[in-house]
Each structure stands twice: as structure tokens, then as C-alpha cells.
Amino acid sequence: MNHTISVLVENEFGVLSRVAGLFSGRGFNIASLSVAPTLDPSVSRMTIVTSGDEQILEQINKQLNKLIDTIKVIDFTGQDYVERELVLIKVNAEEETRAEVLRIADIFRAKVVDVTPRSYTLEITGAPTKIDALIELLRPMGIKELVRSGPVVLGRGSKGWKGSE
Amino acid sequence: MKKTGSQILLECLHLEGVDTVFGYPGGTVINIYNDLVDSPIRHILNRHEQAAVHAADGYARATGKVGVAIATSGPGATNTITGIATAYMDSIPMVIITGQVPTPLIGNDAFQEADIIGITRPVTKHNYLVKDVKDLARILKQAFYIARTGRPGPVLVDLPKDVQMASTRFVYPDTVDLRGYKPSFSGNVRQVENGVKMILASKKPVIYVGGGATLSDASPELLAFAEAIQAPVTTTLMGMASFPKRHPLSLEMLGMHGTYYANMAVTESDLLIAVGARFDDRVTGKISTFAPHAKIIHIDIDPTSIKKNVRVDLPIVGELRDVLQTMVKKLVEHDDEVRELVERTAPWRAEIAGWKKKYPMSYKQTGAVIKPQFVIEKIRELTNDDAIITTEVGQHQMWTAQFFDFSQPRTFLTSGGLGTMGFGLPAALGAQVAFPDRQVIDISGDGSFQMNSQELATLVQYRLPVKIAILNNNFLGMVRQWQELFFDRRYSQTCMELPIDFVKLAEAYGATGLRATTPEEVEGVIRQALETPGPVIMEFKVAREENVMPMVPAGAGLNEMVLAS
């Protein structure tokens, strides 16, 4: 089962490889990882999707906390959160399938961001399961290329972590 | 007033109380070495960067202070890795300074460039590449703070040559503020209270002590705690010497080559109180049969150590000295219950006394061949109580742990976690630098000794009177033992066939060499070595196929130990 963890870290060079090295050095798997600065430019937020049993997850949390550059670890296991992923899909759009691609895009509220006589490039954000469903529907049309951002996550509710405290 | 990066470095070391550094010069640290001439800091020139780091490590283990080593970039820096990894595994506070090629050349495969930050990331507590001289003082302040607080460990600071040469106004920060690093010192009060309740309800408690007790200088608190509840105490290799081995409550070492009574006590216990220990596989044996009837209290400053290998019923995160002090105070509040506990656990101590009597740690010195255990006992007899003993890694290390009666903390320096051959000699060197007047003895095997024997030159140059006892069996003994027991005596590549004349080797370096080939000669050689000024090699030609016993075979339970081969 996948687990999502947010890690707030110092926005300094080498921190990403410290975190990635922590996972690889212990044989923990990273399913996806996205990183960018927060409202406070000195802090970056990583969203890591990983898997493992309870004991492995506990170790991952503790080991992440142990890094000097780690400011806060938020484990979303068992919590209510909003999850979104961005994907860009370049799909075949020959004469006979163009309408079908647009119809599917419309159902999923995907945006067409690039058009050529033989392709559409679609942009969609949503929960990873929704994106999986879209990909499955477009697969028969012929997907030329695809890029996923990996999920980003925020906890639900009014409380938030803004930056330096 | 402005100072250069290299001047700032040396000034910071001085302000951190560093009086001695170990190292080896090179092109990218030449500025630091130039400024060393005008600095009050003493520099010990080792003969290999690995040894410089082990020496700084030995200095740190013996004193409790932060050890410091300097190496140049590229090969100098990569040579430090084994030393750094050794310190990391045993949580030794150290700061390692490496030179780096000038910042514009970093990443260009410049001469003697290595990505030492990348290479040392998995074996340091933290590391820094200093890109701007303005950050240097702050980084060094942080490096020392990180190295010595929380669970201690090595911190590497990589210093490019142009940063060493650049100048800035020098201001040393008074405090450290790292928003992500706030080690907890006191244990949670409620958890400590729960721990006391569990102790007061126990019938067969055992205290299991690791290297953390030494690191936090918690020996007096540990003694007070154990005596208060009259619980038997077993230590790991790293925890040894933090609890007096001849104390009536001592079970000595547990684990693969531990005593029968320690392993049986842990197996039969109903409460295991782990104190600064990390449940290493050499200690637990087969996890599923480790302390099967016991509830486990785990006191450690590092939360990642808790529940890593075994289930834990009560974790207490905090500094050992502090937690044990609080625990003893709480116990005093429950005076009557403590008395009941001590009465209730009397049969438990009697049972252990029975095991001790029936299965003592023993060997027999018979015949004309020297038994290695005999040499170790004789060294013990003839040395002071506060002598510092270092070891390399292998059979001699285990015999030292088994047969040397350590009674004072920081008198046994050995590579526990990483098991680094070649550690003992440079570590002894570092300890002797710290304590020039104390007896410092490296107990070694012939294989391990040859891994850093070049440090004889350093000993002679600085007139460091380290005594080296080589238990020479012309074998890589521990591997040979495994080959004998588990590989049908197929001694693949473990026989050191070339007979080395260690006496002549000592003389070649300007040291003294002595040799014993019969049991009768052992005592005389040790006495003579201790009386001889300067470094001495004592070579003991010992029984070639002696085994370390008892032994828990890898993958077996602690109660399945083999008592004799």
C-alpha cells in the first residue's frame, strides 16, 4: 500500500540527494517524489509516495526526522488530505479519433494545450486514480508521450504550515 | 580585522577547544598547513589519512572530546572513508576537514577532485561543502555542535582551496540555531514513570548496556541504577568498561561470543532494560528467539534505534545520564516497592550465580604453546587499572573482550559496528596523544596489525610509548575459525604464509621489538615492554588454531550457543 509523506527541508543544495540516499541506502522504495520551494523560499517541500509495512514506515519517518536539514515530517497515513497530480499526455489524434479524444478530455475536464494535425497534448490535474483512468481510456488511441508530476498533498482543514515558525 | 578562510578554520578549532589535530598535508590544504605554523594547535603527521581519522577517533573515544582530522582533496579525502565509517557506526564525535579543488573547478574532474560530500553522505552524521568564506565560521560552529550533541557522530567539512584563500571579517557565532536539529535531552517523564512501574513488577530483570552509556558518560548513573534495583547487567562490546566487569551484578558480554550466563539470562528474562544499545545482530542472534519472554524498555537518544530490529514495549528517548538519574530518583520515591523487588528477584540472581559457577569463561594454558587468552590475562595483571586498551578486529578482539577485566569507562577502544581491521594501532596513537602518561596498549592480530603498521613511524616520531601486543598465529584467525567450523576446514586464503619478523620490523622503524615463543617468556616480555620507554612491539607466537569460545553460530538463538569446539 502506498503512503504519502511531506517533508519540509532546508532549501539547500544536496538535500534532495540526502533524502533520496536515505531511501536507497536502506532499500526503501520511492514511488514518486516532487520537490519545490514553499512560501518561505528557504524551505522546500517534498512530497514522497512510498510503500512498506508499518515498521518500515516508522523507520522512514524517524530517519527523515533525523536528517539535520529536515524541518518537519508530515505523514498523511490515516489522515484526511487533498491530493493532486499533474499530467501532460500527447495522444494520437488522426481524423477518425480526434473527436473521441476531445470527448474523453471533456469528460475528465482535461485541457488541450497543444494541437497538431496528428496529435493533441492534454493537461489534466487530479487524484492519481483519476489520471490512471484517463490514461487507460486514451491508451487505445495511441499515447505518444506522457509525463506525470507525482502527487502533491496538503492536509485538509484550516491548519497549515506556512514556513519559518 | 579580516582573516583568510584557513586562518578562520584554525581560529574556530582553537575556540572549540581543539588542541590537537591529526592529518596529512596536500595541495588543496597547503594554506591551512601554512597557517598551522603560527597556530597553537598541535598537528600529528600520520602516515596515512585512514590512520589520521582513526587516531582522531581514538583521541575522541579516550577523552570524550571531538576528534579532528585533516586531509587533502581526492585521494586524501577518499582515504578517510573507512575511518569516518568506523566513527559513524560507533557514534564517535569527530570533525573531518577535507580540502577541495577551487570552487570554479568543482565538477570538472580537476586534478585530485572527488565529490567527497556525495561519497561521505551515508557515513557522516552531516556534511558541508563551504562555498563562501562568509559561511565558514557558522558552518564550523554547527559542525562541532552536531558532532557532539544528540547521538554523536562524524561531521565532514569540505573546504575548497579558493575559500581557504579568500578573506572576510571573522565573527564566531555564540550559539547554534538549526531549526531541523533539536536533540531531546530529557526523557518523557510519563514514560520514565511507566518504566519504573515495569521494573517494579518484574521478576527476572536484565539491564543490557551498549556504547551509549560510554558516550553519555553515564557510568556512575548506570551503577547507581543497577545497584538500586539489584538487576544483573550485561554489556555489548561497545558498552564494555562502562560497567565494572568484576562487579557482582556483572554478566559481562552477551551475544555471539558472550558469556553463557549473559545469554541465558537474556533468554530467560522477563524484563530487558536496553540502555544506549541498538540490538545489533551480533548481540541478538536469531531475532525470533531473542529475549522471548521479556518486555523490553529501550532508552536511547536516537529514536531511529528504537524498534529498528526488535519490538519494544516502552521507548524512552533521551540522554542516558539524564534518564537514568530521573529513574533512580523515581525509584527512591518507591522505597518499599524497591525493597520488595530486590527480595522477589533474589532467586533470579541465585539462578544466574549457578550458571556462572557451572559455565565460567575459561581456557587452559597447558603445554609449550602460548594460548592467546593467557597473554591477555597477563597483560591485564601487569597493567594499571586505568590503562587504555585498543584492539584491532578479529579473534584477539573477542579474547580481549572476554578476558580483560575492564573497570573504568573509556579504557577499551575497539571498532564495534564496522569491525575495522587496522583500527587499533592508530586509535592507540590518538589515545596516547591525549594521555601521554597513561599506559596505552594495542592488542592486535598479525593480520590486522599489517593493515596500518606504517603508523609505527608516527609513534616513533612523536615518542608515543604505545605498546603493541601482536598475537601472531599466522592466520586471519576469525575467518579461519569460521572456515574450520562451517566450511569443513577449507582454509581458503586465511593463512598468512609469509613469516614476518615483527621484532625486526619494530627495529626498522626505530622502535623496540620483543618476542615470546613459550608461555614462560610471556610475563617477562610484557614486563620488559612496560618498562621500556617509547613504542614497543611484543610478538607472541600463539596457538595457531585456537578458537574463540563460546560461540553462537550465525542465525542461531542465544540459548543455542556452542561452549567448546
Image: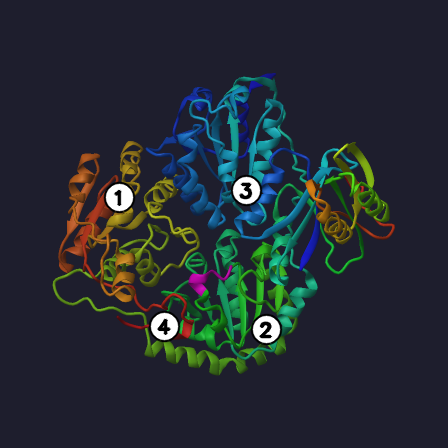
**Alpha carbon separation for disc pair 1 and 4:** 32 Å
Amino acid carrying label 4: it is Met
Q: Amino acid at mark 2?
A: Ile
Residue ID for mark 1: B450
Query: Which numbered disc, 3 or 4, marks the residue that appears first in the sequence?
Result: 3
Amino acid type shown at disc 1: Gln
Which disc, if any, is residue B147?
Answer: 3
Residue B550 rendering spot, x and y as whole percentages: 32, 69
Do we see residue B36 in this rendering?
Answer: no
Residues at marks 3 and 2, CA–CA distance in whole angstroms: 33 Å
The reply to whether label 1 and label 3 mark residues of one chain is: yes
Q: Residue at x 42, y 68 (%)?
A: B250
Q: Which residue is mark 2?
A: B199
Looking at the image, residue B169 lies above or below residue B202: above
Q: Residue at x 80, y 34 (%)?
A: A113
User: Most extreme residue toward the front, as rendered?
Assistant: A96
Q: Residue furthest right?
A: A158
Q: Which residue is mark 4?
A: B561
Please provide the residue range marked out in magenta: B278-283
Q: Please report, as a chain letter, where disc 3 is located.
A: B
| Disc 4 to disc 2, C-alpha distance | 28 Å
Residue density around tag 4, few if under 14, some if 14–19, many if 20 or more, within 10 Å = many
- Tell me whether marks 1 and 4 sit on the same chain: yes
- For the residues labelled 1 and 4, say whether their Cβ atoms are less than 8 Å apart: no
Give the chain letter at badge 1: B
Give the number of the mark in front: 3 or 2: 3
Q: Is A59 in front, or is B66?
A: A59
